[in-house]
Amino acid sequence: MPKKMARSRPLFDRQILGRALTDALRKLNPLSLFRNPVIFVVEIGAVLTTLLLARDLAISAPGAGFALQINLWLWFTVLFANSAEALAEARGKAQADSLRKTRTDSIAKRLAGGRVERVPSSQLRAGDLVLVEAGDLIPGDGEVVDGIATVDESVITGESAPVIRESGGDRSAVTGGTKVLSDWIRVRIVSNPGETFLDRMIALVEGARRQKTPNEIALNILIAGLTAIFLLAVATLAPFAEYSIAAAGAGSVPSTTVLVALLVCLIPTTIGGLLSAIGIAGMDRVMQHNVLAMSGKAVEAAGDVNSLLLDKTGTITMGDRQAVEFLPVAGVSERDLADAAQLSSLADETPEGRSVVVLAKQKYNLRGREVGEHNAVFIPFSAYSRMSGVDLDGRRLRKGASDAIGAFVRERGGRIPQEFAEISERISRGGGTPLAVADGGKVLGFIHLKDIVKGGMPQRIGHLRKMGIRTVMITGDNPLTAAAIAIEAGVDDFLAQATPRDKLDYIRREQAEGRLVAMTGDGTNDAPALAQADVGLAMNTGTMAAKEAGNMVDLDSNPTKLIEVVAIGKQLLITRGALTTFSIANDVAKYFAIIPAMFMTAYPVLGKLNVMGLATPQSAVLSAVIFNALIIVALVPLALRGVRYRPSAAAPLLRRNLLVYGLGGLVVPFPGIWAIDRLLVLMGLV
Amino acid sequence: MRQQLIPALRMTLVLTVATGLVYPALVTGLAQILFRDQANGSLIRKNGRAVGSSLIGQQFTRPEYFHPRPSAAGRGYDPLASGGSNLGPTSSRLTVRVRESVRRYRAENPQFSGDVPPDAVLASASGLDPHITPANAEAQAPRVAKARGVEPDRIRALIHRHLEGRDLGLLGEPRINVLVLNLALDETVGSR
Amino acid sequence: MTETGFLQIAVYFLAILLVTRPLGAFLAYVFAGRRTFLHPLLRPVERLIYRLSGIREDAEQRWTGYAGALLAFSLFSFLVLYLLQRLQGWFPFNPQAFGAGNVTPDLAFNTAVSFMTNTDWQAYSGEATLSYFVQMAGLTVQNFASAAAGMAVAIALIRGFACERAGAIGNFWVDLTRATVYVLLPISLVAALFLCSQGVIQNWLPYAQVQTLEGGTQIIPQGPVASQEAIKELGTNGGGFFNANSAHPYENPTPLTNFVEMLLIFMIPAGLTYTFGKMVGDTRQGWAIFAAMSILFLPGAFTAYISEQSGNPILAASGVQQSPSNLHPGGNMEGKEVRFGIAASALFATITTGASCGAVNSMHDSYTPIGGLVPIFNMLTNEVIFGGAGAGLYGMLLFAILAVFIAGLMVGRTPEYIGKKIEGKEVKMAMLALIATAASVLLFTGASGVLDLAEGSYINPPGPATGNLNNQGPHGLSEILYAYASGTGNNGSAFAGLNANTPWYNLTIGLAMLIGRFFIIVPLLAAAGSLAGKRRLPASSGTLPTHGPLFVTLLAGTVVIVGALAFFPALSLGPIVEHFLMHEMRVF
């Protein structure tokens, strides 16, 4: 496992906490708080009650102790809400700092007119050519145009093993701030200063350019609307009270402080205070999986995905085909075939070749021999001959594609046995790759190479299906092979012999039917599809074009990560919904605490609504306000960590969450407010 | 919206003719043919003169008649001012009125004891309620019998004959039409 | 509590259940322009109306055009009705010679708004104010038109869900005409004749004068009642021909007519739930809405019934029987008719306020506090417990949008309802409607609670706005709250003790009715337009199912918590505290 760039930090470490608290104070500035209407209303209420308190103190009116306590708790409410957001941001900022440390201004060797000039990297512009040699820091994001080098990208990925970067193909992208370890490359810079990948990463984790996601905006409208409604309810309580007092001939109009307290209790402060923290924490969680999301919207979209396009190779299967079986033609023993296959593969360092050696050893206890003394000549694989093998002791052992071997055998006057084609076909139909083996003019048989579906993959795909997500396997294999693997992996659909164009068309088709599509990709030719997909997870090893096109980059370059990203997206939405429900459900209990308290003097009979048996009207109001403030703090860990999420269908998920957060939200405040009331009485605060 | 104004005006006028004139005229025509008596108010005639409607309650205060419910319609059973008292459950005016009614009811019906039937002292919704409950009628029977000088059982038998059960055996409440019962009293029992 | 009482409620509910599907399917056919069994007879009428009005049947409207047409139509409806009232002396069918003097400008405004908005709040007494001509050509027309317009809006909103990436949501004129011609007129005609057969009057005679048995005279109003009565219930209008409304024996002579009138009130709102399911291609969705409405309706009906049947301890202490026997219904009979008794009255009250009808067969003002709380609660939920013709469905869909939005998040997806994503625009429109209606109820009630004018002032001759009350104490607050809840909810029933025929109440309740009508309709049409333009997403196992008991519970819970929570303080100072006080025998 690679070392995570953003190790999962404990939720509250001291440094972050300290930073969050100062930020929380800074956020009291009404100009910034204005963006959060719910908490803004609380702040106005707090200011108002502070002024009233000052007036009361000035004229030494009675009851200032109660007003003071209410006032303090109102300010705490604002601070708690601010700290939640600040805490989430501080975690991002801490990461940004550690990234920023790596961004040193290096000296670049700019190539201009065949000369090398040394300029500070900050002066490089897109289109400049630079030379980077062993030991140099790559001065900016770019494409390798010439050369090959090993590069240490641990700054970005946390992965200490160096990677190869070379011109052409899909491994040509380099990132500014990474270091060339050996050899040299010429790089065309693709980004201006301040716009590099690293810069963007820092900006992202810092949340500097954080924009509200569509869903967040909608939720904000909902809670702002509820705030407006409760504002009306509380504001009109004064005339209702006035009428009631005249009608009852007793009592006094509730003080403004108490009305503000009721308002703050009723408006959805819990979700209002935690909403942005939830969003930031969601991004943070994605980051902890070493995935860089370019926007919160992308993470949200991941939760909505209906179809997941997964590359077969490396995602669904191990990536390398393995030899699983030797299938001799008539008249050849399996052992002889295994022996020949092993000999032909001894010098073959590809995973496939190694798997042949291993299989022969496992099955027939054939040891890898030292072949040097046999005067062996190894024939490497070439695109022209499409076979590889070895010549030793006069034997010409070859393995390769059926038609290539067929031609080789015929050339040597050999005969192709009739079952040759039949075996080849059988292996293909089973999803494997037939690799024919021949000894000169004699066909020996086939090695059955097979894609191995990763352990646990069918289960994960099953989970996805439960979540309502279709999985589609993308492969370059022929339809026969693809179908066999698709069945084995349990995917819902597959796209065989897929060209980049096919991928793009498939995505468009899915989208036309109203589905949201997620995919992974790394090559330049994946870029259009990555851009078209609603969630495009680019591999960090991929080309710059691919990284630009997608809206997420996986720094570990592990395509399976897409599944985790989807889960995080869902968890983000669930957390928002759960806390909104909880927040609204809480109001019922608060009414029962405050309404009887407010009108005890006019209508003592309303005491029957005091179902919690709160001690005095003052303790009732105070307990409700304190509960309201503390619940924000209590739910911060939940907001940052996200609610528990296990893949399942929507109905059971809703049932569970409604039970926990809906019913829980209805019930929990009753004992909570009651306990605070007892405590206040014990402490003599009321 | 401007180009909508002309169709809006025309549509308003067309619908006014269709639903405001043609439809009521159609209903009136058919009703006058099919249900002439009901459509014209279910009036009861005695000796060619309308004495009331079987659906509209009227005031009775004399002891030989069954008395209807208290009425809040005008000065009592005024069809030009239909309506209830609209006094709420905690209205002191309601309490005072009800206590007074209870007192008077007991005084008028001395043979009756116990709590009075609710309809006897509580005003109806329309102020024109033509009915009373069987309990109320039973309670008044001795008084009416005495005033008319007949056996209470004869009166009770008449009540029983005029008892209307629940519609379809389920809907509403058993009831007695006061005007119809009093007319029957005049016809069959006669006054003293 | 009697078995017959509960049975009446149960049988009524069963009857509504039975009528929902056939009527709903019929409505779906009508609004899709498909042939029904009425076509041979009525299609020519429909075409005639288009020709006379200059409407092109096949022209589709975007939401703005649809809303513009509705607003223009409402404007003319208002103007025509206002002028008819003020000029009633010029028109025929006026045997009692009512004139402009009977209808002040503020009353005419209030009444015109009231009938145009399907509220049918009446600050006047029909038999003493309006000519037969105004009752027919003014009020009856609006009974049809406002109901048809409400149905049209509901259908437009359904189209928003049902269609796939469309710009248009139908044609208002066509929907309006079809609702009137194929649905409202035929059913009203049949119902009116049935009501006539039971004793509801239908004539143009002058008021009858009779000699009573005791020698007094009684003047009995006449008029074309049955034709208005039928559409009054069917179109969930509720404006009575007479002041006593459906308690009047000429409007509602027998328990059977009472049952039929209750059926008429709920049949279109209930049927539309099925229409919804049918039009969106999944009838389970419609039944889910029906079920949510039902679980809000039935507890209300039983609560009102039980409370009224339990009676008033103050009355019991005064020597009035409160427990039922075979010979009388017992309970709180103040303001109730003997023929209906307790159950049929409490049921009617729950239905008429659930359905934004506002017809009454008993006087709600005299209900026990909890019995009166049920109607107020029903109206405060924005009239979605079956609700008005059309208005109930679109109001409930508004709550469905909010419920789906909150709950949808809890399953980890951007919420979808009927395959349409619920996003900022829809939430904004739903919240706008909720805020506007809450503001209307709360601000006007609050203002009336403290408005203090000099006695004899033009605005409110009694002086303070509380001077118009018929009851003191918490019940007085309930009277005011009821008035604005009724106006805003476009219900029209009243705690009728309140003397609302003063410029202050006429104008503010008039405004409340306008807010309650158009601040829901226009935002919802906007939402319909936005929804119509969206793609309908296929459902998967990850989609929130909106047809099961879970969603039904959630929807009902959203109506109660989001819809009514803001009114809890007002309710606790009105009916709730009155309930406790009544049990302490406190009077005001």
Image (tube, coloured by chain):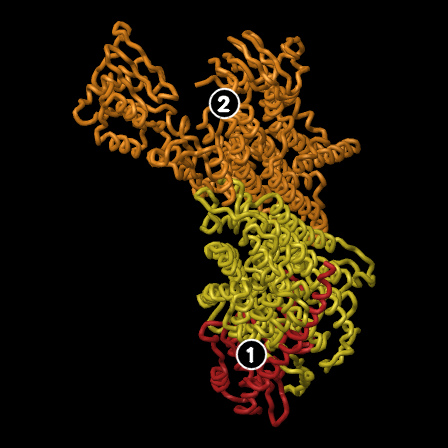
Chain colours: A orange, B red, C yellow
Mark 1 or 2, closer to the camera: 2
Left or right of C514 on screen, residue A637? left
A604 up-or-down from A443: above or below: below
Residue C215, picture quadrant: bottom right
Q: Chain of mark 2?
A: A
Residue C346, image x, y percentages: 54, 64
Which residue is the extreme one toward the left?
A331
Q: Nearer the viewer, residue C323 or A38?
A: A38
Residue linked to disc 2: A170
Mark 1 burial class by Cα count in 10 Å: few <14, some 14-19, many 20+: many
Left or right of B184 on screen, residue A70? right
Label pair 1/2, CB-CB below 8 angstroms = no
Which residue is the extreme one toward the bottom?
B47
In the structure shown, which secondary structural element does the residue marked by tag 1 occupy? helix
Q: Residue at x 76, y 80 (%)?
A: C97
Residue type marked 2: Asp
Q: Quadrant of the C terminus of chain C?
A: bottom right
In the structure shown, which secondary structural element does the residue marked by tag 2 occupy? loop
Q: Is residue A307 visible?
A: yes
